């Protein structure tokens, strides 16, 4: 057998516990709250098909040709106009189109991280961002959070001990996995700390447009004038994740490096997809579509909160998101979450155990619940079943 000489970046183990959870939970009979999937019945299938037809009719040869690494200029202009409505004024020249925001995170890590460099994130945080940072050799450190996001006093204490930290990674709106958002005061403090400790803030914002309660909070990038924030956005949750289209916006010196690295990775993001989304934004009312998603998720989120109150033990702690797709719950300490997961699967219902979302010091009695991918009726019945299983283990 050949003994392959893998690079030191490659994980030694092929274990993928999170992937296994999602595979088990994807059995059709299961009511799954495990994944992070948007509601497929809300994808604008007919409109996107019509747009694709128009593109092939009008510009078939052009769209099938190679394009530029930074991405379609028209699309960048349309995203800039959209981001203006979200409180961020951005020059399209300071934007890079990426193959999903996941690629944006990868390119940022490649640009900034040498083995041993430190990345601080919320604890818990988006698992696949941690995986990317670790693949480039980063040491990841967690900072606790509450309903107002990452705790700035704890961040400052961590920075004092790790003043060479290169990146602070945050998901400031309706965070994956907790659903919590970072307050304006903490966003401002984070920018001050970035100046003081000379780090880059990665502001990962897939969910910010899906707000169904409370007031919008200014993007962190809009609060910084020193070029220390890289914003990553995506069409995955507001349009369709299969299109794999995202963007990054940042200081031109950073975008220039990221554009080069992205070109080395995949030349440019699929040109047809870029043209489809640009034309969709021109020919249709994307905001009306986002409003429709937001209204549906509001109902589903409320149904899940009600179900936690109705069916879970009274001591359960849980978040009350004002948007996005996730609720985070902490069950009584005596419940073994892995055992609960196995029992739930037997009863055709699934969630994701919380431990893998922690960069360090996992809290083992936690779970992430996704409400975007199921109807209100399914949420009620699935949560009722889960409540019964929890009660049977909570002796
Ligand atoms: N960041 C966060 C916080 C996410 O939850 C996700 C998707 N689940 C991504 C980035 C990646 O999204 P995509 O590559 O589809 O844009």
Image (tube, rainbow, N blue to C red):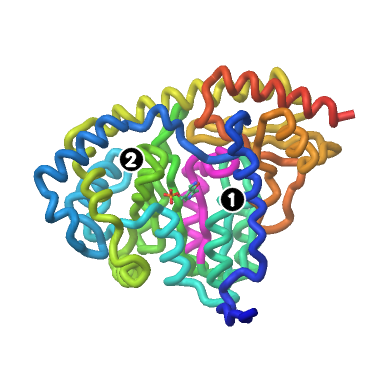
Horizontal side of 129 relative to 346 (left or right) equals left
Q: Which residue is drawn at 36% across and 63% down?
A: 227
Residue 77 horizontal/vertical position (percent):
20, 49
Residue 227 visible in the snapshot: yes
In space, the residues marked 2 and 1 are separated at their CA atoms by 23 Å
Residue 327 visible in the snapshot: no
Looking at the image, tell me whether mark 2 or mark 1 is earlier in sequence order.
2
Residue 153 horizontal/vertical position (percent):
62, 54
Horizontal side of 259 relative to 338 (left or right) equals left
Q: Which of marks 2 and 1 is in front?
A: 1
Horizontal side of 24 relative to 184 (left or right) equals right
Q: Point out the image quarter for the C terminus.
A: top right
Q: Please give the range of residues in magenta.
A: 167-194
Q: Which mark is residue 125?
A: 1
Residue 135 horizontal/vertical position (percent):
55, 68
Q: Which residue is drawn at 66% across and 59% down?
A: 15
Q: Which residue is label 2 attached to?
A: 86
Residue 217 horizontal/vertical position (percent):
42, 39
Give SS at disc 1: loop
Depth check, front residue: 366 or 38: 38
Q: In which quarter of the image is residue 211?
A: top left
**Magenta span includes 42:** no
């Amino acid at each position: 057998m050949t003994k392959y000489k893998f690079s030191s970046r490659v994980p030694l183990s092929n274990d993928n516990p999170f992937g296994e959870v999602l595979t088990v939970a994807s059995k059709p009979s299961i009511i799954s709250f495990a994944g992070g999937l948007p509601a497929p019945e809300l994808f604008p299938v007919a409109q996107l098909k019509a747009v694709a037809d128009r593109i092939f009719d009008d510009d078939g040869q052009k769209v099938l040709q190679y394009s530029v690494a930074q991405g379609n200029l028209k699309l960048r202009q349309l995203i800039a106009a959209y981001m203006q409505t979200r409180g961020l004024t951005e020059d399209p020249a300071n934007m890079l189109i990426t193959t999903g925001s996941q690629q944006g995170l990868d390119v940022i890590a490649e640009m900034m991280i040498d083995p041993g460099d430190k990345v601080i994130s919320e604890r818990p945080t988006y698992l696949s961002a941690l995986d990317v940072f670790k693949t480039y050799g980063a040491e990841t450190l967690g900072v606790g959070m509450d309903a107002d996001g990452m705790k700035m006093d704890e961040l400052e204490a961590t920075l004092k001990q790790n003043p060479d930290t290169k990146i602070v990674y945050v998901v400031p709106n309706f965070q994956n996995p907790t659903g919590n958002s970072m307050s304006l005061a903490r966003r401002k403090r984070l920018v001050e700390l970035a100046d003081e400790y000379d780090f880059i803030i990665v502001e990962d914002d897939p969910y910010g447009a899906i707000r169904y309660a409370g007031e919008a909070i200014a993007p962190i990038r809009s609060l910084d004038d020193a070029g220390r924030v890289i914003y990553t956005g995506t069409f995955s949750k507001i349009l369709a994740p299969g299109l794999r289209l995202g963007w990054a916006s940042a200081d031109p010196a950073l975008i220039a490096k990221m554009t080069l690295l992205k070109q080395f990775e995949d030349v440019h993001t699929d040109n047809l997809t870029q043209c489809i989304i640009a034309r969709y934004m021109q020919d249709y009312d994307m905001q009306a579509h986002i409003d429709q998603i937001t209204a549906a998720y509001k109902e589903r989120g409320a149904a899940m909160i009600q179900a936690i109150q109705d069916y879970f033990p009274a001591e359960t702690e849980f978040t009350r998101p004002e948007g996005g797709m996730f609720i985070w719950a902490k069950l009584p300490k005596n419940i073994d979450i892995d055992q609960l997961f196995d029992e739930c699967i037997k009863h055709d219902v699934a969630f994701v155990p919380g431990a893998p979302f922690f960069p360090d010091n996992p809290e083992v009695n936690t779970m992430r619940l996704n409400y975007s991918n199921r109807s209100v009726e399914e949420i009620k019945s699935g949560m009722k079943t889960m409540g019964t299983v929890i009660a049977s283990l909570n002796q």
